Image (tube, coloured by chain):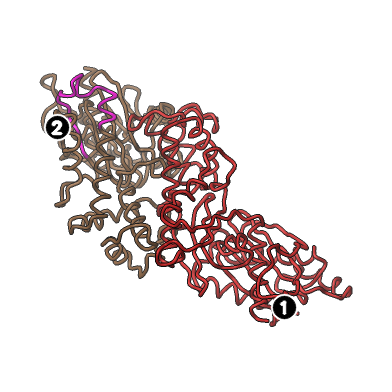
Chain colours: A brown, B red
Amino acid sequence: MKRDRNGGIWDFEHEMAAAGGDQDLILGLDGGTTSTVCVCMPVIPLTDNHLPSDPPPVLARAVAGCSNHNSVGETAAKETLEHVMADALSKAGSTRSAVRAVCLAVSGVNHPTDQQRILDWLRAIFPNDVRCSVHNDAVAAMASGTMGKLHGCVLIAGTGTIAYGYTEDGREARASGAGPILGDWGSGYGIAAMALTSIIRAYDGRGPQTMLTSSILQELKLSSPDELIGWTYADPSWARIAALVPVVVSCAEAGDEVANGILLNAVQELASSVKAVVCRLGLCGKDGKDSCPLVMVGGVLEADRRWDIGQEVISCISKEFPGMRPIRPTVEPAVGAALLAWNFIKEQS
Amino acid sequence: MKRDRNGGIWDFEHEMAAAGGDQDLILGLDGGTTSTVCVCMPVIPLTDNHLPSDPPPVLARAVAGCSNHNSVGETAAKETLEHVMADALSKAGSTRSAVRAVCLAVSGVNHPTDQQRILDWLRAIFPNDVRCSVHNDAVAAMASGTMGKLHGCVLIAGTGTIAYGYTEDGREARASGAGPILGDWGSGYGIAAMALTSIIRAYDGRGPQTMLTSSILQELKLSSPDELIGWTYADPSWARIAALVPVVVSCAEAGDEVANGILLNAVQELASSVKAVVCRLGLCGKDGKDSCPLVMVGGVLEADRRWDIGQEVISCISKEFPGMRPIRPTVEPAVGAALLAWNFIKEQS
């Protein structure tokens, strides 16, 4: 077994090893800015060339904090990743020697250099014959909707937003995902920031009056739009602002024109990210009529409201690309990452 | 003389006092987020009810760093303010006993409580008979264009933007000035952020190609739009992004449609701030035809380019309010603050 740089993390293996009889395992990890999830699944022998329609059972699941190296720094990110993998294996009653493949899908991995750095570190942790792969977290979201197949488009819209596309021959493209300053206007942050702006504009006479004023001030327990300035700049967290999206949806459902306009604009923005990716990769063929999966993930796209942002995005995309098949994943992204790892083993065998 | 809490700041007065024969003085201070300027001017006896067309000569001028309490904290802000006033008086070869009036116009003073706190502190520094006043820095900009008269509208557009209006009977109103998250879209920051966004949108296929890509990447010495994400989030300073405005203007002058669209949008935004203030205060009378000064300040409004943002803003406002008289101040805001202090003395006498 490889060196234990973080003395203690892998100590549990000494006891497990005595038990013997390890089942072959795969690890799938979804590393986000708020939390990191690692699942451990058994390698079930494949009977044909296709992936099964149901994923293998999750043997163990471990959760840790942020593993985005841009947010917490590389050392802390790696420690979190190593801990959560060890935790999942320990809960599964197994050790690294049972692992056949590992797939890490981590937010903040945007360049081949990021990928290579994490891959080198990962290979130093696991035995040489373990199939390791490192991706952006969008890959896990995509795979969670397609049972491990990287083909089609994934649209993620939570606090931020990004669209990724993958062709069957391995090409990739992305749109958005550049953060709020650089125009991710369909994100939860973008929607809520527009709502806050509308309140200020109504208050100082630049824009029409809106129900958003009373609803958001009530939500934030503030008494005047003036106080929004202090509230906004007191804490730079994008998630804190994005958390106001349900209030905007409620106002739109109640017929508020301003809130409605903000959501319609977000729909156009989100659809334009998907359409840009589909066009660049030719995902719907030359005439735009080919079938192609569109995996939709994130709080903004959840179909739990009468004003259904996700449904409107699909309607908007379908006008141009009628073959786009929306998929709302039934498994979590970490399972998607594990299915990718499983896919790699299948390709190798 | 009052207590010297910052031992040393006022030490120079002991030597000056011996010289005697102090001329009556006023202090005007413009405190911004990047720098603070204090000027010292003589009190010239007024011959009639009107202010002269030329301001009194500046006897001394002192410069210090940021005095916005939101940026540096209250203690540091006050120390900067006290230092720069002492410095100006010392350079003028005089002492606090010669001062008749002080006017501080400091950015970040948005609420009566901010104003009162600084006023109490200011009164503890100067003799009881000194006329002290504390305002937002927009007041100094307004007064710099109207020779100390608070009537009309001032539009400031630098890194940020704000419009303030003042009626002759003492009412005030503002628009914008809520920062980039809350939609100050005509600001230098707003213009540059839109340009950066356009580059990302062109790059990922959501928007049209634009000359801004090559021009801004060259300016920032970056090789790909991808690198803009890291550049943007590496340093949260708004001024650093706003510094790209001249590049956007150059591209618009060269005929780039995207850059042109960004500037036209900024013009609409800046004009809408002024119009909102004029409407709320009725500054141009019931029919909107009355004459009213519009003081224009800040890098974005400087008339030094062929694509003249300030001129376009005036054209846009004039369609609705033909009596708006644009004024580009010939003295600096600190002199405007001193003229306000002078005005107060005149009103008292």
Where is B181 relative to B110, above or below?
above
Q: Is residue B141 at all visible to an observer of this figure?
A: yes
Identity, as a three-letter code, of the amino acid under mark 2: Arg
Same-subunit check for callouts 2 and 1: no
Q: Position of residue B72 (x, y in %)?
A: 58, 59
Kindly indicate whether the residue at mark 1 contacts the one at mark 2 (C-beta within 8 angstroms): no
Q: Position of residue B348 (x, y in %)?
A: 65, 81
Judging by the rendered image, the residue that carries numbered circle 2 is A325
Residue A284 in magenta? yes
Q: Nearer the viewer, residue B84 or A235?
A: B84
Left or right of A315 on screen, residue B251: right
Q: Position of residue A239 (x, y in %)?
A: 34, 51
Where is A168 relative to A88, above or below?
above
Q: Chain of mark 2?
A: A
Q: Which residues are magenta?
A: A275-296
Left or right of B191 on screen, residue A20: left
Where is B98 relative to B242, above or below?
below
Q: Secondary structure at mark 2?
A: strand
Judging by the rendered image, the residue that carries numbered circle 1 is B3
Q: Chain of mark 1?
A: B
